[in-house]
Image: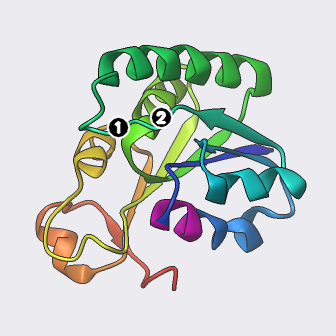
């Protein structure tokens, strides 16, 4: 089995790295946004980089198109069986294309989201095969989600 671990950089990537022990027996790779923090991953793991998708960036449409093409190419090249994501931003196209291509989608809502859902979480919840929350308070937003505690 091949696993794709996908997230934006920062706290989402820190959370995603906590999932490594659960997938280390499988072939896996990362997809994340290019940043100083994520550049360190390439020393130890196979990594693909997306363009940072910031809502305030004037190039948001251009970056979204770039990430759509990159995501599709990564999925075709690597053909993962499972995609695990902690969000946000640039990961949505990869999750959506993965679902269209028949991949299992597992999403873990951000630890930072205690009282309200994230935009990416709300979108991916509609088609995720498994959806996990790290706070029981989110159950009202995601009734079918599974609560298993926090990644921390």
Above or below residue 77? Residue 114 is below
Residue 38: assigned label: none
Residue 142's quadrant in the figure?
A: bottom left
Which residue has dot 2 on it?
Answer: 95
The one nearer the camera, 40 or 71, is 40
Above or below residue 80? Residue 114 is below
Chain part drawn in magenta: 11-15
Residue 31, how many percent across, how many down? 64, 41
The one nearer the camera, 123 or 113, is 113
The one nearer the camera, 47 or 146, is 47
Q: Of the residues under marks 2 and 1, which one precedes in the sequence? A: 2
Check if mark 2's residue and mark 1's residue have beta carbons within 8 Å: yes
**Quarter the N terminus occupies:** top right
Q: Residue at x 83, y 44 (%)?
A: 46
Residue 127: assigned label: 1
Q: Residue at x 54, y 69 (%)?
A: 15
Above or below residue 98? Residue 141 is below
CA–CA distance in space, label 2 to label 1: 9 Å
Q: Main secondary structure of the magenta part?
A: helix
For mark 2, does the 10 Å Cα neighbourhood hold few (<14), some (14 to 19), or many (20 or more) residues? many
Residue 145, how many percent across, how many down? 31, 63
Residue 89's quadrant in the figure?
A: top left
For mark 1, does the 10 Å Cα neighbourhood hold few (<14), some (14 to 19), or many (20 or more) residues? some
Residue 43, how many percent across, how many down? 88, 55
Colour setup of the view: rainbow
- Residue 14 magenta: yes
Q: Secondary structure at mark 1?
A: loop
Residue mark closest to the camera, 2 vs 1:
2
């Amino acid at each position: 089995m091949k696993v794709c671990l996908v997230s934006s950089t920062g706290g989402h990537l820190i959370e995603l790295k906590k999932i490594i022990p659960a997938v280390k027996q499988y072939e896996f790779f990362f997809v994340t946004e290019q940043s100083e923090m994520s550049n360190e991953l390439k020393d130890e793991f196979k990594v693909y980089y997306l363009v940072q998708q910031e809502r305030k960036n004037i190039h948001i449409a251009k970056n979204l198109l770039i990430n759509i093409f990159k995501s599709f190419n990564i999925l075709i090249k690597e053909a993962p069986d499972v995609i695990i994501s902690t969000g946000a931003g640039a990961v949505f196209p990869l999750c959506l294309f993965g679902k269209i291509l028949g991949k299992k989608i597992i999403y873990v809502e951000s630890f930072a989201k205690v009282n309200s859902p994230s935009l990416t979480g709300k979108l991916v919840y509609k088609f995720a095969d498994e959806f996990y929350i790290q706070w029981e308070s989110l159950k009202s937003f995601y009734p079918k989600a599974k609560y298993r505690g926090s990644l921390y």
